[in-house]
Amino acid sequence: MAEEAVEYLAGFLDGIPGAPAAGLPGGEEHAAGLREDAPPAAGASLVEALDVIREAVPRAFDTTGAGYLGYIPGGGIPSAAIADLISDVTNRFTGMRFPAPALVELEWNVLRWLAEAFGFPPEARGVLTTGGSMATLSALVSAREALLDEAITDGVLYLTTETHASAAKAAKIAGIRRVRHLAPTPELRLDLDALRAAVKEDREAGLRPFCVVASAGTVNTGAVDAIDEAVDLCREEGLWCHVDGAYGGFFQLTERGRERFRGIERADSVTLDPHKGMFLPYGTGCLLVREGRRLLEGHSAGEARYLQDLAIEGESLNFSDYSPELSRDFRGLRVWLPLKLHGWDAFRQALDEKLDLARLLHEGIRDAPGIEVPWEPELSIVAFRSQDGDDASRRLLDRINASQRVFLSSTMIRGRFTLRAAILSFRTHRDRIEEAIEIIRAAAAR
């Protein structure tokens, strides 16, 4: 079975360079024909099952390909898939340390490495999650527990209209009903003057400001908030400063990223998505908390008697005490093995290349007739639009994506339909971005 699966996957990898960037058309029609009301009474062969998968996979966005520049690509490096195969077959339980101490230690190694990369102190703790949304939820729960206790009704969370939607969603789930969305600066960054005024206004109204979310790269344009100044303000006001680095955080590994994220080492918590900036498979997020006890206090809830045989004296090293999960997959292996095989430098070099490619794309289209590029790329996202309005921008996007060599997505920024190219696949190199420039300029000329 493994040989048959690997044979299929080898063919899939070989076909990536020539695959259409947005996948084959007809996905919904194909899906409709796959509906089954019940599983078969008798089992089918793996060959038959692989045939179904082989037909379905191409009719989806090709998030693994060099031309996938829509949303936030990751790429899914194969070494992580090998880790998942090992993890799933051996199927060890890593929600608590006692059943698999050495494997849990490997995952703690990963978290220590990440904390060190962000300049967090030794007492920092973290947890690998299914993604940035769950990481942000745990961050807000930790902040709520630290600053609001049980009196959460009057707690206020501060975002900007450019903050990822997962923050407001996490607040809702965490019971935080007062969320203020502040207008950003013209550069689409957190407006610190507006934040300070909002905190003052809310305090005078008897409310309890408790947390600010700053962005280490927004998903719309890659804008980076003034993190150092945001932390200063939070310290002055007694607020928790959380940094959303789900998209852009791993640029911290580069010299340019560290300069743009100055002050991130002083934040109370940071969300990261290794399935973005480390090119790992979807389902790999991370939360780092500067004072590790805050993460523990936000998630531990007494003992479960049926687990008493698994208890260890001293500081908890159970991931179940640092997150909402008891049962969990061994997702640490899919981070540890690629780092062990490739080393930090491979990831650092790839991320530096993405910064260069974003600059290349920006310079290649900023003077194209009919196109306006309102913002300089701070990380690896380039946002642009037609000078002739929203309808023209929609047509421009359709013409670009019709090439099937690149796939871009769109967003709304200050009421304007805007195209965005997000360069973050480890398979995207200079040749594809040069091709993208030609495609975009030709589409604009039409």
Image (cartoon, helix red, strand yellow):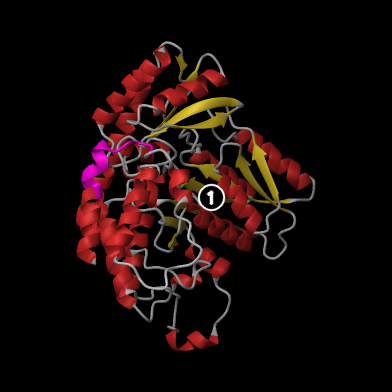
Establish if 128 lies above or below 77.
below
Measuring 32% from the left and 34% from the top, which residue is drawn there? 67
Residue 7, image x, y percentages:
20, 56
- Tell me the element at label 1: strand
Where does the C terminus fall, quadrant-wise?
top left
Q: Is residue 239 visible?
A: no
Please name the residue shown 49% across and 21% down the image. Answer: 395
Q: Residues within 10 Å of mark 1 (few under 14, many from 20)?
A: many
Overall secondary structure of the magenta stretch?
helix
| 295 vs 359, nearest the viewer | 359
On the image, the x and y values in percent for residue 346 come to: 23, 46
Q: Nearer the viewer, residue 194 or 160?
A: 160
Residue under pointer 1: 242
Q: Quadrant of the N terminus?
A: bottom left
Q: Does residue 69 appear in the picture of this structure?
A: yes
Q: In the shown orientation, is residue 148 left or right of residue 247?
A: right
Amino acid found under the numbered disc labelled 1: His
Residue 440 image point, x, y percent: 38, 21
Q: Is residue 174 left or right of residue 253?
A: right
Is 186 in front, or is 49?
49
Residue range in magenta is 12-22
Name the residue located 34 percent from the left edge and 78 percent from the top edge.
100
- Estimate the x, y position of residue 25 in percent, counting from the top left: 41, 38
Label total for image: 1
Is residue 13 highlighted in magenta?
A: yes
State the residue at coordinates (40%, 68%).
329
Q: Indicate the quadrant where residue 359 lies.
A: top left
Q: Is residue 192 magenta?
A: no
**Quadrant location of residue 328?**
bottom left
Up the image or down, 248 lies above or below 377; here it is: below
